[in-house]
Image: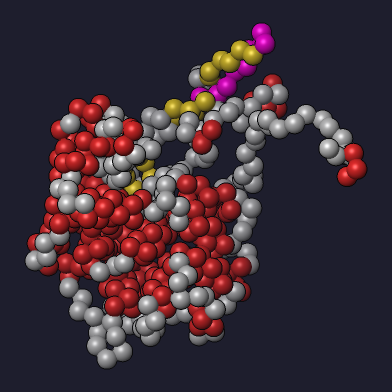
Amino acid sequence: MNKVAKLEIEGKVYELPIVEGSEGEKAVDISHLRQQSGYITLDDGYGNTGSCKSAITFIDGEKGILRYRGIPIEELAEKASFVETAYLIIYGKLPDHAELQRFSDLLTQNEMLHEDLKFHFEGFPPNAHPMAILSAMINASSCFHQRLLGPLDDETFELQAARLLSKVRTIAAFAYRKSRGLPTIYPKPVYKYTANFLHMMFSQPFQDYELKPEIVRALDLIFLLHADHEQNCSTATVRMIASSKANLFASAAGGVCAIWGPLHGGANMEVIQMLEDIHREGDDGSRFITAAKDKASGKKLMGFGHRVYRHYDPRAKIIKKQCDDLLAVLKRADPLLDIAKKLEDAALHDSYFIERKLYPNVDFYSGIIMRAIGIPIEMFTVMFAIGRMPGWIANYKEIMDGQGARIYRPRQIYTGPTLQHYRTISERR
């Protein structure tokens, strides 16, 4: 017997189906509530609203669990590469050797940008934000591949996904080089995904960047840990755009714009800025912790707490170890890391933060790793967008594969003026 919830409105009882996910998550299906009763639900910020059914990523915020297609993030971080993880997220299974080779070959074949796109790069001012360039150039690049804008079959989608995933790193690297007045560095087919990105970022025409395995692995891990994260702001934006049957590039460009916001992808930038401010003031973090507990101080502990996780962000545990390992290999002391560890230790043992479940999240350490690699702060959110691309592609695919899917169209509760009539300008006083 199917379970139902009963809702009584004005003396009338409505039966609403209960939907249960594969991990036991339960939801009340209100799809027909307005049709049956004339009422809608109000959930500002969608904090208690399931916008879709998805088979991509599972999160249990209370237990600190994150799984891609059922596989724990800890296992993928230890054993998989970003490209292998991207395949898993997009296609729903781990690739065999032939599948992984084909996918990697497609990425290599599609890493170059059309030469005419150079004129688009030249049109941006030198101080243009890399995220603005990234979004605009993703959209612009689709114009050079008209086949990708037509009907979507399996072969076309495979090509769309590979082109977008490959070209996004090329666009990002070119945007960085332009912002620094540096010559463009083209990708090399012999390099794998993340190594090629670092090459395009930091090589010079007369000297290739030294690709240390520890640096390549650290950045690859950052991409992997950000590859998908359920229905966050940017992913929900991608699905919203995709529901109109817009093409993949347009949908991803919208995701870039959403992730640009300081409350989403820009959080790791704020962590570094906070640590720099603490260091500049000659504080080891102790005074800042005291101030952060005083609402009147205006000080906020960035990189702690999460909209979903009410426990330690599982990605933070992984990336913290990588951060320690990388700095040890580079033999590079970083006073900001010392301050970060002080803040983390205080937060994990201070009742004020424990009671509020303010644990470190992935943004807390990712910025320190990128800083050690040499990636400038204005590129942090770009790294986030590159990493999140597989999740956006997979969510786009779910929308396109959905049978009878409707365009997303949330309702609202209107709070403006009631009926009023037009007055001529002489009557307006």
Q: Position of residue 336 (x, y in %)?
A: 19, 55
Q: Is residue 280 visible?
A: yes
Residue at image point 60% right, 50% down: 243
Q: Which residues are magenta?
A: 10-18
Which image quadrant for residue 373? bottom left
Comparing 421 with 357, the one in front is 421
Residue at image point 62% right, 16% down: 14
**What secondary structure prevails in the magenta region?**
strand
Residue at image point 29% right, 29% down: 356
Q: Is residue 397 visible?
A: no
Q: Residue furthest front?
A: 429
Q: Position of residue 378 (x, y in %)?
A: 37, 64
Which image quadrant for residue 360? top left
Q: State left or right for residue 137 relative to residue 307.
A: right
- How many callouts does the rendering have? 0
Comparing 23 with 305, the one in front is 305
